[in-house]
Image: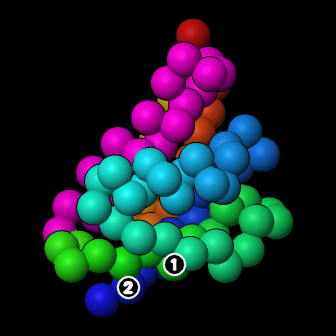
């Protein structure tokens, strides 16, 4: 089973790093489009907890590099934004 996910504010996110981070979460991904946003076709033997896995991948990609916080906007849309405050 596969799902398309979209990540907004993706100019901050390197596509290859994101695909590697998804793989570390047990998911494989393929780039569909990178303008606007990053649209990926994601699949894996175990698609349960997809949102948790995508958020974990986003956290690993943004950790320490830039001051952005990953968040989930709906079932298949995610974003990275500056921290509130």
Residue ID for mark 1: 41
Residue in the picture at 38% in, 58% down: 23
Q: Residue furthest bottom?
A: 1
User: For mark 2, does the 10 Å Cα neighbourhood hold few (<14), some (14 to 19), or many (20 or more) residues?
Assistant: few
How far is the residue under mark 1 from the one under mark 2? Answer: 7 Å
- Residue 35 occupies which quadrant of the picture? bottom right
Quadrant housing residue 22: bottom left
Which residue position holds label 2?
2
- Position in image of residue 71 (x %, y %): 46, 42
Q: Is residue 81 above or below residue 17?
A: above
With 3 as the anchor, is 33 left or right in this view? right
Q: Relative to residue 72, is residue 30 drawn left or right?
A: right
| Residue 54 lies in the magenta-colored region | yes
Q: SS for tag 1?
A: strand
Whether residue 55 is visible to the viewer of this picture, yes or no, is: no
Coordinates of residue 55 in the picture (x, y in percent) = 38, 46
Tell whether 72 sits left or right of 11. left
Q: Position of residue 1 (x, y in %)?
A: 30, 89
Q: Earlier in the sequence, mark 1 or mark 2?
A: 2
Contact, CB < 8 Å: mark 1 with mark 2? yes
For residue 39, what is the image quadrant? bottom right
Give the SS element for disc 2: strand
76 vs 24: above or below: below
Q: Is residue 81 inside the magenta stretch?
A: no
Q: Residue at x 41, y 70 (%)?
A: 28
- Magenta segment: 48-68
Residue in the foreground of this view, choosing between 23 and 10 = 23
């Amino acid at each position: 089973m596969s799902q398309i996910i979209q990540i907004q504010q993706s100019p901050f996110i390197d596509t290859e790093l994101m695909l590697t981070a998804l793989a570390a979460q047990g998911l494989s991904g393929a780039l569909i489009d990178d303008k606007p946003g990053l649209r990926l076709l994601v699949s894996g033997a175990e698609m349960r907890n997809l949102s948790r896995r995508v958020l974990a991948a986003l956290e690993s990609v943004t950790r320490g590099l830039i001051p952005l916080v990953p968040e989930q906007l709906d079932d298949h849309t995610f974003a990275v934004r500056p921290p509130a405050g």
